[in-house]
């Protein structure tokens, strides 16, 4: 976004990308070699407590911030794309990091500018057609997508194609697109910085492609409560989906969470207050930032199911030094950090 979204996951061989079929198998990740062990799957907690890293990387010369992260595990290593803002605080760009094995190595990873601007990127592997897809905003349509066979190459993507051609009422602009599939349909969820979350859909057979102009309102609330950076995931071993949405709080940006049993269904608040959020100053454990903003959860694999493992839950987020309070939004010095759920 001008505020956007991203995350991590585990690499499974391409032949088996998809939702796990055995409830007693879970796959360990966090940047190490995969191992498979017999273990009971975990439900989402009703309340969340996290521990946090400090800032994990500093923008290269010419950039003031790294933000709107999207992340997968690729060949056993973290692959992260992000938005950038230049030192003037005016010009957005996009980039990826060279792959790295552990979050502690992120600072040493190369920072690779993209030759075009793909703001608020969201990366998935679309297994039915064996293609990588990244969606983003601010292009020749409200949202665009590109495809690749090598997601590590920041400048190896196809030419942009329209992902969504609709418009919102009252002059609001669609922002922060994210994609997820349920085995039959692909869904596009997005925000508008206006208190609403929106949804569009298409059959797998038509994806990747243009969702067109039609959409529906999934939820509405105040602008502060449903602001931006929506992400949606399937919960491993459960008949459940998780949505997180960034809110503007009294003590900084934070994430609210909602659950549903189908992607085309109704969403129920889960951890949805500033005092007991999904992730925010109240429960992040972070001492370097008040904002827990524009993040992506660790996925069990990079495919279109966006599967997360509650037994090993991590959130890659953007944070900033509170001393930067009062600066224009686009000049805020956002950095990546990672939260790990406490059990």
Image (cartoon, rainbow, N blue to C red):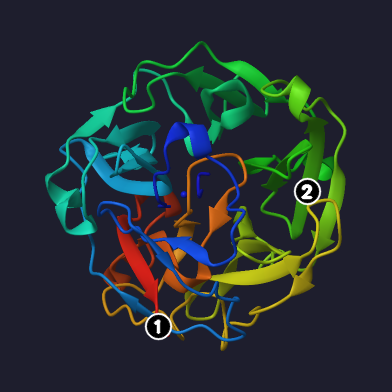
Q: Is residue 55 depicted above or below 92 in this figure?
A: below
Q: Which mark is residue 91?
A: none
Circle 2 sits on which residue? 198
The residue depicted at 58 percent of the width and 30 percent of the height is: 126
Q: Position of residue 282 (x, y in %)?
A: 46, 86
Please tell me in which quadrant of the rendered image residue 172 appears. top right
Circle 1 sits on which residue? 342
The residue depicted at 32 percent of the width and 53 percent of the height is: 34
Please tell me in which quadrant of the rendered image residue 95 appears. top left
Query: Closer to the camera, 270 or 281?
Result: 270
Q: Is residue 163 depicted above or below 187 in this figure?
A: above
The residue depicted at 70 percent of the width and 24 percent of the height is: 207
Distance in Å between CA atoms under marks 2 and 1 = 31 Å
- Which comes sooner in the sequence, label 2 or label 1? 2
In the picture provided, is 217 more to the left or to the right than 186? right
Whether residue 318 appears in this view of the structure is yes
> Callout 1: 10 Å neighbours few (<14), some, many (20+)?
few
Q: Is residue 15 depicted above or below 158 in this figure?
A: below
Label 2: state its secondary structure: strand
Whether residue 123 appears in this view of the structure is no
The residue depicted at 17 percent of the width and 41 percent of the height is: 109
Residue farthest to the left, as pictured: 108
Query: Closer to the camera, 250 or 174?
Result: 174
In the picture provided, is 130 more to the left or to the right than 30? right
């Amino acid at each position: 976004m001008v505020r956007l979204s991203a995350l991590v996951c585990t690499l499974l061989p391409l032949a088996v990308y998809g939702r796990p079929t055995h409830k007693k198998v879970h796959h360990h990740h966090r940047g190490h070699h995969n191992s498979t062990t017999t273990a009971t799957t975990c439900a989402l907690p009703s309340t969340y407590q996290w521990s946090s890293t400090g800032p994990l990387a500093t923008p290269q010369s010419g950039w003031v911030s790294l933000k709107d992260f999207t992340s997968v595990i690729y060949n056993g290593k973290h692959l992260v794309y992000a938005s950038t803002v230049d030192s003037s605080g005016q010009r957005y760009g996009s980039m990826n990091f060279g792959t790295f094995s552990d979050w502690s190595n992120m600072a040493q990873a190369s920072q690779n500018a993209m030759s075009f601007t793909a703001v608020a990127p969201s990366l998935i592997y679309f297994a039915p057609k064996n293609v990588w897809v990244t969606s983003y905003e601010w292009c020749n349509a409200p949202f665009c997508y590109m495809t690749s066979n090598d997601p590590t190459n920041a400048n190896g993507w196809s030419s942009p194609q329209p992902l969504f051609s609709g418009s919102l009422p009252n002059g609001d602009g669609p922002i922060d697109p994210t994609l997820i599939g349920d085995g039959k349909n692909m869904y596009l969820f997005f925000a508008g910085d206006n208190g609403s979350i929106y949804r569009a859909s298409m059959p797998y057979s038509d994806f990747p492609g243009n969702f067109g102009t039609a959409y529906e309102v999934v939820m509405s609330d105040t602008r502060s409560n449903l602001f931006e950076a929506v992400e949606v995931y399937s919960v491993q071993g459960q008949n459940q989906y998780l949505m997180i949405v960034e809110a503007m709080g009294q003590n900084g940006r934070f994430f609210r969470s909602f659950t549903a049993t189908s992607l085309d269904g109704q969403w129920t608040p889960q951890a949805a207050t500033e005092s007991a959020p999904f992730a925010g100053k109240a429960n992040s454990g972070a001492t370097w930032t008040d904002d827990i903003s524009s993040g992506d959860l660790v996925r069990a694999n990079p495919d279109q199911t966006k599967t997360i493992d509650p037994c090993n839950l991590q959130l890659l987020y953007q944070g900033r030094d509170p001393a930067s309070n009062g600066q224009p939004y686009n000049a805020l010095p956002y950095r990546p950090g990672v939260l790990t759920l406490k059990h």
